[in-house]
Each structure stands twice: as structure tokens, then as C-alpha cells.
Amino acid sequence: MQKSSQDHENIQWPSFIAATASVTAVGVAIGLGLPLLSMILEKRGVPSTLIGLNSAMAGIAAMAAAPITTKLAHRFSVPATMIGAVLLAALSAPGFYFAENFWLWFPLRIVFHGATTTLFILSEFWINASAPPKKRGLALGVYATVLSVGFALGPLIFARIGSDGLLPFLLGAVVLLIAAVPVFIARGECPVIDEKPQLHFMRYIFLVPTATAAVFVFGAVEAGGLSLFPIYATRSGFSESQAALLLTIMGLGNMLFQIPLGLISDRLKDRRILLFIMAFCGLVGAFTLPLLSDSWEFLAVVLLFWGGSVAGLYTVGLSHLGSRLTGADLVAANAAFIFCYAVGTVAGPQAIGAAMDASAKYGYGQQGFAWAIAFFFGLYFVLSGVRMIFRPKKT
């Protein structure tokens, strides 16, 4: 029998700590690896276009890994699959250092990001399953906050040790191997997936559309917004340091609002209400950006709350997903959730970049940045509203 998150009233702390600690270690490794790899390629004289193409393999790998993760977890168990993914990611990390041929970095990226995608999917399933319905939002809010800290620690470590030599790659591999320790210790606490999902993988994308669409918008706005915001800010008249500080404030909003949003979602009978409100906040915030281009202080305040709303789509969307499904279906739906996030990270930068070019070409300055983000939030605002009206009891 599968263990269901409906069968207990309190958070199963051994499971929660194991899954959260594991994925946080992965977050540190990714936070260290992303700037490290880009810097190494820059030093080797690789053109920016090819660096961007290689970086895009992260999204492609995530989309490829998501559909097979559930099958692996069913066949080998969740802990065994997670430990195997840790080993693959840890072995591939030093490979970047030894691979002198740039084109070898493409299969290495696919292995590394495919393995870490598997870890995210199964960790989030484990956390969802370890939390009771009335505390699921709190659990996922804590998870999102701790993961944000992990992602922030990675660049700090990179700033400390630099990109020279084998050390940063070995350190990344060691951090990844540490991620296997809590999984191994708590392996007996993990839910058993003793049956296959009832539906084809692609069906899960549309089974809980309010959740999967939320994470698609989050991926698009996070990847596109964060990567292109410095360009938007500097072209709007801010200095590079001011633009960097605005990004930091946005990240602070991501971190501060996750637990409060999780607690609020636990008090709602229908979490789609909160998702709808956050979509509205995101839409209003996007339209506000061009109006505040002359005031750094007001823009910082808007970005603080706006950043929390953007990140909340992920946390509350994942909580909503966990409230609907259990067992193998939850693993498959979580894989579909991550798949939609990956699609968003690929689509967002392309759409927002194209909108910025188009607005500049036709005399509207940099307003295409805000318009494109508003477009993503507007789509989700309409979808979530329609779902609540026509599907008042279930999504």
C-alpha cells in the first residue's frame, strides 16, 4: 500500500528533513555550478551565443528527465533513484573541468541537469507526501525558503573560491554527494510507489492545470525576468549596481514571503483563490514597472512584493498539486509540474527578449519587458479565474 499524506495529522519530520536537506545541497551545487561553468567558458573564449546555447541544455535536460523519473522511482524505489541521481550528478561535475572539447559539455549538461531534475521531482514528492493537508503549505513554504538559501549560498562560495583549477568542481561534487546522506538515513520513511501512474505522462500536465500553468508562468518570469532585468534596468537609466541591488531585493521577496503564503494557503479551502490573487498582483506589478522607472525606491518596494508573488506561484501551486493527488499519481504529476517549469524557463527568456527588441524597434523603449511579463501573468489570471468559476470544487 502507498503511504498517503492524508493518513497523518503532523508533518513527518524525518522524511521532511531528509528530502529538504538533500535538495538544498543540490541547490548549493547548482548555485555554485551555473556561474562557474559560464565563467570557465568565457575564459576559454567561447562566444556568448554558444554559452547561452549550452546553458539552455538545462531546460532541455529537465524536459527529458521528467517523463522517466516516475518509471525509475516505481522500478527502483524513490530513495534508490535519488541516490543514483546524486551519483550521476556528482560524477559529471568534475567532467566539465577535464572536458577540453566544448561540445562534450552538451552531454555533460544533459546528465547533470537531468539528474538534478530527478532529485527535485522526487524530493518535492517526498515533502508533499510527508505533510498533512492542513500543514502542506507551511511545509512547502519552509522548503522553498531553505532552498532559496541554498541557491544563494552557491554564488557566495563561488565568489570565495573563484573558478581556477579543479577545486570548485570537486567541491561541487562533494556537496552533491552530501545530498545522498539524508536520503540514505531516512530511506525507510519514504512512501513506497508500488503501482504505476494511472495516466500517460502528458495527461498529468492538464490534470491539475491551475498548478502546472502556475509553475510555467513562474519559470518564464523567473528565467526571463531575472536574466533580462539588469538590461532593462540599465537601459531605463539605473546603474549596474542599482540594477543588481534591485535583483537582490526581488530575491529577498522570494525568500521572505514563502512561509507566510504557505500558512495562508493552509487556511483556504481552495488554494486556487490565492493563486488567482498572486496572478493579479503579478499582473499589476508588471504594468507598474514602466511607471516607476524614475524612482529607484518605489521600484524596490514593488519588486519586493512582486518577487514574493512570483515565487509564491511555485510554492502554492505545488501545495495545490499535493492536495489533489497521492502515491504514483503525485510523483507523475510532480514530474509534469517540473516539466512545465522547464518549458517556462525556455520560453520566458525568448518571449521577453523578443518583446524588448520589438518595443525598442517601434519606438516604445524598453516597455516590451513589462508587457511580456504582463502577458504571462494575464494568461494565468484568466485561466485561474475561469477554473474557479467553472470548476468550483475540483480542478
Image: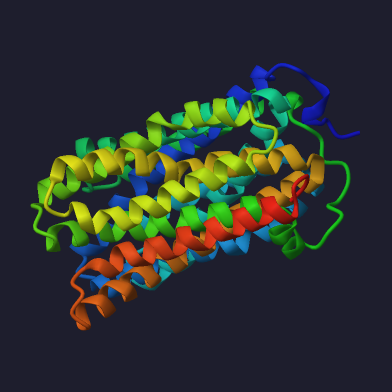
Q: Percent position (x, y) of residue 79?
A: 70, 36
* Apparent side of residue 5 relative to residue 261 in the rendered image (left or right): right
Q: Percent position (x, y) of residue 297?
A: 15, 40
Observer-nearest of 236 and 158: 236
Q: Percent position (x, y) of residue 323?
A: 73, 37
Q: Quadrant of the N terminus?
A: top right
* Apparent side of residue 177 relative to residue 366 in the rendered image (left or right): right
Residue at the (76%, 42%) spot, across then down = 324
Q: Residue furthest right?
A: 1
From what the image shows, is residue 182 above or below residue 176? above
Q: Percent position (x, y) of residue 374?
A: 40, 61
Residue at the (73%, 46%) spot, across then down = 331
Whether residue 55 is visible: no
Observer-nearest of 153 and 40: 153
Residue at the (49%, 27%) spot, across then down = 259
Where is residue 32, by image quadrant? top left
Where is residue 254, by image quadrant? top left
How many numbered marks, from 0 up? 0
Observer-nearest of 81 and 10: 10
Residue at the (72%, 32%) spot, across then down = 129
From what the image shows, is residue 218 above or below residue 202? above
Whether residue 376 is visible: yes
